[in-house]
Image (tube, rainbow, N blue to C red):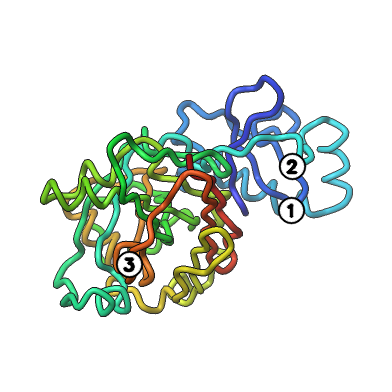
């Protein structure tokens, strides 16, 4: 299933499934007859009643008769008529990993880390696909970073590596926007990484069964149509199971938490001369099987 969050006309943000490139199934529509959600995080909970039923319904909606029934009821909407939001509109946690691609470490002449380097972003960083990245006041060196993000689907605490993948809901494109001048001036990363609009992601979360191997995905970033980053998640230093096992040692992971797994080489500050985001730019993050995340810069 390709899980989205969307608004239609004057509606609030609702959970949906992308049935094909042109149609969205409104999972909150009464015709879907899905279990009620007591809280927003139920949308992402593999152990709850809502999400497994929604996945089954999305599969059935591929059948012509079932889709016709849902369309007649108004539960299937043209994609052009909806506004997509980040597929997890307000994550409880956004945990990010630094220096986690071998080729990115080589680009900087840095040694590979012995354990994951962890920092965080806030829910106020989240940005919808197509919405504008805002260069913060005082920054002249705002940079781009394409990343694969993992969305947690099951509460995790002290999870062993061999059971870690059981806690994955799915995967999505993520853009770790970074104000390098803030980051390097402070000596730690929080301010430079957590400005408003610095966490665009989406357009959808592809559930785990749609991504057979998250460690074999091409990952690219284009700036105004020019490819700036082009690598593969095979270059990850710490893969998804290792990250979940490590992070769940220190933080309880909950459904809807987002883990951004790091960026490959080609980032702006490492280029000669450096390349930074400017108003009027358009940035695209593309990962195999996960579509394209596109955002303008203002």
What is the secondary structure assignment of the residue under circle 3? Answer: helix
Residue closest to the eye, 278 or 198: 278
Residue sitting at x 77%, y 37% = 77
Of the 4 image quadrants, the one containing the N terminus is bottom right
Q: Residues within 10 Å of mark 3 (few under 14, many from 20)?
A: some
Residue closest to the eye, 137 or 80: 137
What is the secondary structure assignment of the residue under circle 2? Answer: helix
- Mark toward the viewer: 1 or 3: 1
Can residue 147 be seen at all in this image of the molecule? Answer: yes
Marks 1/3 in contact by CB < 8 Å: the verdict is no
Report how far apart the C-alphas of labels 2 and 1 lie in the structure: 8 Å
Residue sitting at x 81%, y 30% = 74
Residue sitting at x 62%, y 49% = 55
Residue sitting at x 83%, y 30% = 73
Q: Is residue 260 left or right of residue 189?
A: right
Q: Earlier in the sequence, mark 2 or mark 1?
A: 1
Residue closest to the eye, 210 or 115: 115
- List the residue tagged with mark 1: 21
Q: Is residue 88 above or below residue 118?
A: above
Residue 286 is situated, as x and y percent measured from the top left of the image, at: 54, 63
Residue 16 is situated, as x and y percent measured from the top left of the image, at: 64, 40
- List the residue tagged with mark 3: 241
- List the residue tagged with mark 2: 79
Marks 2/1 in contact by CB < 8 Å: the verdict is yes
């Amino acid at each position: 299933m390709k899980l989205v969050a969307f608004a239609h006309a004057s509606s609030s943000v609702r959970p949906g499934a992308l049935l094909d490139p042109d149609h969205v199934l409104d999972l909150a529509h009464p015709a879907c007859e899905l279990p009620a959600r007591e809280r927003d995080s139920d949308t992402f909970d593999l152990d709850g009643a809502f999400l497994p039923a929604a996945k089954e319904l999305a599969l059935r909606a591929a059948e012509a008769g079932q889709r016709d029934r849902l369309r007649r009821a108004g539960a299937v909407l043209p994609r052009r008529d909806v506004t997509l939001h980040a597929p997890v509109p307000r994550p409880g946690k956004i945990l990010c990993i630094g220096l986690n691609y071998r080729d990115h470490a080589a680009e900087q002449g840095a040694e590979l880390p012995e354990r994951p380097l962890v920092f965080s972003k806030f829910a106020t960083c989240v940005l919808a696909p197509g919405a504008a990245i805002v260069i913060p006041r005082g920054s002249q060196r705002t940079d781009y970073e394409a990343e694969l993000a993992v969305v947690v689907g099951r509460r995790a605490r002290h999870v062993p590596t061999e059971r870690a993948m059981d806690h994955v809901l799915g995967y999505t494109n993520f853009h770790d926007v970074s104000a390098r001048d803030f980051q390097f001036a402070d000596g730690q990363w929080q301010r430079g990484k957590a400005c408003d609009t610095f966490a665009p992601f989406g357009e959808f979360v592809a559930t785990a069964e749609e991504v057979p191997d998250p460690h074999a995905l091409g990952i690219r970033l284009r700036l105004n149509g020019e490819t700036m980053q082009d690598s593969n998640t095979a270059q990850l230093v710490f893969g998804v199971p290792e990250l979940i096992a490590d992070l769940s040692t220190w933080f309880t992971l909950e459904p809807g938490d987002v883990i951004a797994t790091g960026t490959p080489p080609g980032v702006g500050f490492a280029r000669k001369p450096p390349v930074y985001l400017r108003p009027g730019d358009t940035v695209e993050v593309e990962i195999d099987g996960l579509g394209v995340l596109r955002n303008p810069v203002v």
